[in-house]
Image: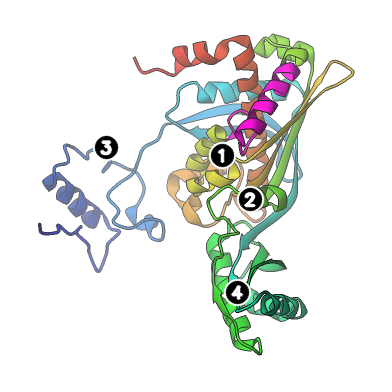
Amino acid sequence: MSRASIPRDRDDDHGAPAAAARREFLMQQGAQSLDHVGSFSFDPQTTKGNIENFIGAAQVPIGIAGPLLVHGEYASGDFYVPLATTEGALVASYNRGMRVIHESGGARVTISQDHMQRSPAFLFRSAREARDFGLWVDDNTTKIAEVAEATTRIGRLESITPFAVGPNMYLRFDYSTGDAAGQNMTSKATLAACQWMSANYPPGADFILSGNIDTDKKHSHINTLFSRGKRVIAEVTTSEQTLRDLVGVGPKELFRARQISQAGAFMSGSANNGAHAANGLTALFIATGQDVANVAESHAGLLYTQLLDSGDYYWSITLPSLIVATHGGGTGLATQRECLELLGCQGEGSAKKLAEITAATVLAGEISLASAVLAGDWVTGHEKLGRNR
């Protein structure tokens, strides 16, 4: 059977004519209609570097939730959060949680760590050779950092942590990456560093650029402990009256349910002992041009609560591997840039602001869904808002 090749334009493959030619090609292959795929408002030339074989756009509905009151070190004040989703009731749920946070004085948000990793593996004949290489790396970290940082304008190598396994030495390179997520940046920098190390280590050393302990776009326990991206904690203290008025349950019922769900998460080996961080993350990622596959890492979470002596209820969510950016990737596309601007997340330092808003958004979702399960709103809310009839 002959292979039907996708049309390409060597001179202008991201122009409107090239996209139209590919849509016509797909119609010839049996597509019923691509009218909506081919209808979009941005200049297709702006997608260079974001996509290949461009044919159009996926139009995902965007809703707005808020105001979300945030007291962070980078984000401060009320924010209206764009959420792109096809799941009915999601925006309404996050909106309700944001109201609880607002009526409780706002969410305090703290970033405690911020670095991106690449983790090469160096291969030797024995464990002792691997150990000796690790000692050499420790003695030459300054030069290794100089070589790595020569490949990037904003990336900085903060540390190299060794992990010995048999005759191999895994190295976890930690970088600061400014407002970029930094996966590509750290790959380029680490490749240069590894090539220098291989050439300058006296006995010589073979390497693989990723030994897979950076667990790129995969959840891992090492990233829960040591973080990848930003480690962000959002917290709020809510009163019984606020909870009763807005979500129909009280602190004692919530704390009892937390004990049950905590045990369930432990028993199942869940990456998150909360309710549904991935929902808000995915919707916000799509709206703001994040690499959506990073939800695989970013959704890991540690929900921690306290029933206070005052009768109030303390909530916090720790996201140990939150990967967000305001520079690079899809953040420069027209729709996504508008959503970032809506949040005031443009310019230098804005990635940390976005991270604080994101963590507070996740906390709002935890509050709303945990309450809905107890109050009986979980099923009825989806019946009312989440079905296309």
State which tag comes first along the sequence, 2 or 3: 3
How far apart marks 2 and 3 lie (CA) works out to: 32 Å
Figure quadrant of residue 258: top right
Provide the residue designation for mark 4.
122
Figure quadrant of residue 102: top right
Provide the residue designation for mark 1.
342
How far apart marks 1 and 2 lie (CA) works out to: 14 Å
Prevalent SS, magenta region: helix
| Residue 107 position within the rendered picture, expressed as x and y whole percent measured from the top left | 74, 32
**Residue occupying the point 61% across, 43% down:** 344
For badge 3, the amino acid type reads His
State which tag comes first along the sequence, 3 or 1: 3
**Does residue 300 appear left or right of residue 26 in this picture?**
right
For badge 2, the amino acid type reads Ala
- Which residue sits furthest bottom? 202
**Does residue 313 appear left or right of residue 272 in this picture?**
right
